[in-house]
Amino acid sequence: MTYVDGFVAAVPTANREQYLQHVRACAAVFKEYGVLKLVECWGDDVPDGEVTSFPMAVKRQPEETVVFGWFLWPSREAREQAMPKLMEDPRLQPDVNPMPFDGKRLLYGGFEVIFDE
C-alpha cells in the first residue's frame, strides 16, 4: 500500500516564484529516491478559523500564504529507507537549496493510505 507524507507551511507571498524553484529542485531529488508523485498547492481559499484552521496551525502572518502538499511513496518502508539518504543529499542542504519560508512553522507527518478511489 502506498504511503503519504503531508505538510502545511506558511510561505511569504512575495516568495512564490522562489518557493516554486525550491520545490522543482527538491522534486527531482525526491523522485530519484523513490517518490512516485509530489503535489504542492498554493492557498487560494484558506479561511481563518475560530477554533482551528490552516492559517492558525502555521501561525500565518498577513504577508504569507498557506501551502499544502503531499508526497506519494510506494510504501512506508520505501520512505523509511530513503529519508536518511535525502537528509544527507548535498542537493537538499540549506546552503545549496535554502527554504524560502520559516521551516519552524512547517507541519508534516506520514500517513497510511486507508482509502483511495
Image: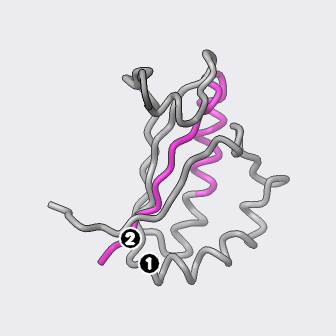
Name the residue: 55% across, 75% down: 33
Local crowd size for mark 2, using a 10 Å CA cut-off: few (<14), some (14–19), many (≥20) = many
Name the residue: 20% across, 64% down: 115
Name the residue: 40% across, 25% down: 46
State whether residue 38 is above or below residue 41: below
Mark 2 belongs to which amino acid? Answer: Tyr
Q: Which residue lies furthest to the top in this view?
A: 62
Q: Which residue lies furthest to the left in this view?
A: 117
Residue 81 position in % (x across, y down): 57, 83
Provide the residue span drawn in magenta: 1-26
Residue 29 position in % (x across, y down): 60, 66
Q: Quadrant of residue 61?
A: top right
Q: Residue furthest front?
A: 51
Q: Dot 1 lies on which element?
A: helix
Mark 1 belongs to which amino acid? Answer: Arg
Residue 75 position in % (x across, y down): 39, 78
The residue where tag 1 is placed is 76
Residue 108, magenta (yes or no): no
Pick whichever, 83 or 32, lies toward us: 83
State whether residue 60 is above or below residue 113: above
Q: Given contact means CB atoms under 8 Å apart, are the residues at marks 2 and 1 in contact? A: yes
Q: Give whichever of discs 2 and 1 has the lower sequence position.
A: 2
What separation in Å lies between label 2 and label 1 (alpha carbons)? 5 Å
Q: In which quarter of the image is the N terminus?
A: bottom left
Residue 22, magenta (yes or no): yes
Pick whichever, 71 or 24, lies toward us: 71
Local crowd size for mark 1, using a 10 Å CA cut-off: few (<14), some (14–19), many (≥20) = some
The residue where tag 2 is placed is 3
Left/right of residue 17 with respect to residue 70 in the rendered view: right
